[in-house]
Image (cartoon, grey):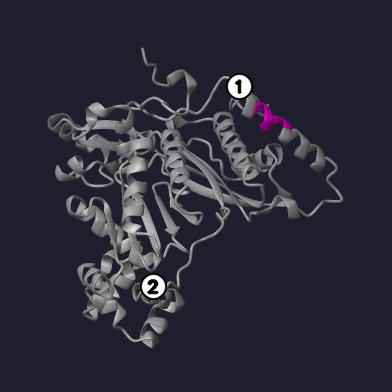
Amino acid sequence: MFALVDCNNFYASCERVFQPQWEGKPVVILSNNDGCVIARSNEAKALGIPMGAPAFQYQKVFQQQGVKVFSSNYPLYGDMSSRVMKILEQYTPEVEIYSIDEAFLRFKGFDHINLNSHCQQMRQQVQQWTGIPVSVGVGPSKALAKIANKIAKKFADKTQGVYCIDTEDKRLKALKWTSIGDVWGIGRQHRKRLEALGIMTALDFVRLPDTWVRQHMSVLGLRLKKDLQGLPFIQLEETIPTKKSIATTRSFEGTLNHFDALEERVTTFATSCAEKLRRQNSNCTALLIFVRSDPHKKGATPYRNSCTLNLPYPSNSSITIGKYAVMGLKAIYREGIAYKKAGVLVLGLHPAATRQLSLFEAHVGKHQALMHAIDSIHRRFGPHQMKLANQDLKRTWKMKQEHLSKGFTTKLSETIVVK
């Protein structure tokens, strides 16, 4: 049997753990730079606040309805997610972290254990130890566990947050209840095609011939159908896949009108990408650099451009990646433009252990040792302690976060003090 554990309104729940005065009240979380709504509590959903709502357009609604607004605090959310996942690992050794607030579990060899009681205990422990409410769906496959989770969340009072699809009758009822657009893995285009054929529920979908599903939805669609039939064709991902590309992109607080200022930002973004590469023990073989003017500023010259460069050898050195990022910036920079956003993407990622050595670059090995030393210093004394020469030593990137909560579990200076 498989289980899907989903944290309820995760971002809002993380904020409420340390500020319980907002329990039962509408809460929304804003994106980077306080741009738009990316998470809502149930109370905020009931007020009709949509996902993606621009914050500046809903200011009056927030004030009139008493909505508490938080800037996104990703370090806090990531730490709380890690705490939840560690608790789940106590209940089964087979755990796939699907997202920051979701995890699939496989209960292999639990034939003589009441899984409903087991999951109720797990749910209560997560709530007690972290303060995060979760819903648990259990089924003979991942797709059915996903549907069971929706039922557990939809009918929380009746299910107590846990629902098991453990009989054929429950499976058929769950499939009949689930609309085709809510099936895990059915995208917008497939939904339109299926609805045009009169396939309105998951039960209608599993009754389609295998040959039709294979022809029109590929082998992935056929696996999904088998999964919904209770045959576990979609297995747990046993390892965390490494990223195929890494990006650092930012909108500026104002606009940048000079090359030196833009160069400093692009170098900083390149350095950030290099640090992320080293954390996952990868090298990149190419860079993409882009710049963009402010599309909303009236009278400004519209401009956007990008440039891709291949590196002479795979690297995760901040020096090398920063150097080529500036070369790309020089190729696309135009005078007289008010730049609002820039970014660096590192592409062609390979494991660092399989790096091809270069006969013509004597400093490659020195870079590796230097980057290791810099990373060690940052781990001990904090980030941004050492920078490249064309970075501003006194400047650290700061997003617009007017409603940011404290780092209750990530900053020692901001932990709760009990008097």
Q: Which residue is mark 2?
A: 227
Assign a secondary structure to mark 1: loop
Taken as a whole, is the magenta stretch helix, strand or loop? helix
Left or right? Give the position of 294 relative to 365.
left
Q: Compared to 222, does 375 lie above or below?
A: above
Q: Residue at x 63, y 45 (%)?
A: 277
Q: Which residue is mark 1?
A: 393
Q: Residue at x 46, y 27 (%)?
A: 398
* Spatial CA span between label 2 and label 1: 54 Å
Assign a secondary structure to mark 2: helix
Q: Specify whether residue 374 is painted magenta.
A: yes
For the C terminus, the quadrant is top left
CA neighbours of label 1 inside 10 A, class few (<14), some (14 to 19), many (20+): few
Q: Can residue 297 be seen? A: no
Q: Residue at x 49, y 35 (%)?
A: 336
What stretch of residues is rendered in magenta? 373-378
- The residue sitting at the front extreme is 112
Q: Specify whether residue 290 is painted magenta.
A: no
**Residue 76 at what x, y percent from top left?**
42, 33
> Residue type at mark 1?
Leu
Q: Can residue 50 be seen? A: yes
- Which is nearer the N-term, disc 2 or disc 1? 2
> Residue type at mark 2?
Asp
Nearest to the observer: residue 259 or residue 10: 10
Q: Compared to 331, does 183 lie above or below?
A: below
Left or right? Give the position of 99 relative to 14.
right
For the N terminus, the quadrant is bottom left
